[in-house]
Amino acid sequence: MAKILNKIKEFPSAISLNKMLGPSFVILALGLGSGEVILWPYLVSNYGLGIVWGAFLGITFQYFMNMEIERYALVKGESVFVGLAKFWRWTPYWFIASTFIGFGLPGIVAASAQVLAYFFGLAEFKWLASALLLAIGLILSFGKTAYTVLEKITKTIIFLGVPFIFLLTLFLVKGSDILALFGGLVGRGEGFTWLPAKISLATFLAAFAYAGAGGNLNLSQSIYIKEKGYGMGKYSQKIAGLFRSKNSEQTIKLSGEEFELNQKNLNRFHSWWRLINIEHLSVFWFIGLLAMCLLMLLAFATAYGLPDNSQGIMFVINEAIMIGQRLAPWVGSLFLLVVGIMLFQTQLGIIDSTSRIMAENLALKKMTKQKVDKINLSKIYYGFVWAQIIFGISLFALNFYEPKSLIVLGAVINAIAMFVHVGLVNRLNVRSLIKPFRPAYWRRVVMWLIFIFFGVFSGITLFDKLF
């Protein structure tokens, strides 16, 4: 009995909203280089603003998904992967395979390299893409902790990049463009309603899935809020840098802690829950939606209807050329530099998040097999970091480096992964959390509607491609 009592912890008091900021910036940044910067502006440059409703609905879906993922980590002090493995032993294998297949394709860093190559006047970009992947490995390896490095870089780029895009849009967008944006929120486009006739369903599903983070990346939110110290995550450990002196001996306990169910702890949970809803709504949903709308407006005002927009990410180059012509050449060049950096930062965040996901799931299987409750997670994490980097460089060496094709293929795979994890997380929170901490019925209904949507849309897209 004494051993059990020693495991009981106090549910921590909520911290201020200002100190809470961080995890939502990280997960927001994971989408900036895929949906926000590439796929939605690509679709708008080719089909107009009548598809804006998809971006709005996509990021709203992800807000609710992320909150249920955060709920589990807030209460349990462990990631959802730990909880899922307790009920379904096959889930670690699924998350390792679907994460590597979905995000191992290095389309975003290829897009970053192509944009930066144009900025620097380079004829070839695949070797620059390889160099950027190596830089990501070094950045993550030399930090004090991987999360701290990622959060600092992410905040800096978002606070500089989004205002710059806002100012560009302010100068270049006309009133009629804004009216077209609002029309797109209710599916009214130029010559179509909801979807244009010739749009690729795979590309639209890819953009929808990446209206935010996408795929298994949403699940990494439970890891980030745990490392940030939300709720019972206060008692969890962080992944140390690869080259820190004591890293080789660092062992981490993946399972969370228990707390006593009493009114004080329940009140503290409600305080946390209210604040993390505000934090995620204001950072992830609002800033994310604002960034997508600004980038779509900018693409519409500068590149809409140009004949070569459909060729890869040529629309980004067209945007820069038109910005340079309408404002000043250096502004167009600066736009390319900002986009290139935002894409690089997104790939940095993706490699970090996917490596965490795969490392934790592999660690869970190893711990079960070895019958231990702690493991050196850092070494496994960095093994996946460098495995992805080597895989990406290998693809570039074999001349698989066209950015949009890689991004769309990965996003379709990730839409299917989202269908799976939405159902699993919804079921997990009902089965594993006691009643006062379970999601309200209306939230469960929303989650099941999202589950059905991704299942049906993924099925239609696969049928369209295969048959």
Image (spheres, rainbow, N blue to C red):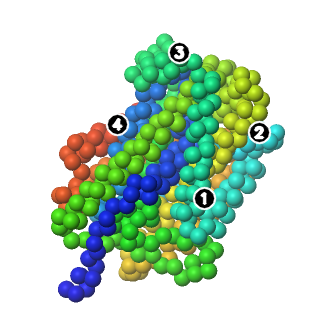
Q: Amino acid at mark 4?
A: Phe
| SS under mark 2 | helix
Residue that numbered label 2 is attached to:
119
Upstream in the sequence, badge 1 or badge 4? 1
Q: CA distance from mark 3 to mark 1?
A: 45 Å
Q: Residue at x 65, y 58 (%)?
A: 136
Residue 101 seen in this snapshot = no
Residue 441 or 226: which is nearer the viewer? 226
Q: Amino acid at mark 2?
A: Phe
* Whole-percent x, y for residue 460 in the image: 40, 33
Upstream in the sequence, badge 2 or badge 1? 2
* Whole-percent x, y for residue 391 in the image: 64, 57
Question: Quarter-wise, where is residue 38 in the image?
Answer: top right
Q: CA distance from mark 1 to mark 4?
A: 30 Å
**Crowding at mark 4 (Cα within 10 Å: few <14, some 14-19, many 20+):** some
Residue that numbered label 4 is attached to:
453
Q: Amino acid at mark 3?
A: Ser
Question: Quarter-wise, where is residue 429 in the image?
Answer: bottom left
* Whole-percent x, y for residue 323 in the image: 70, 27
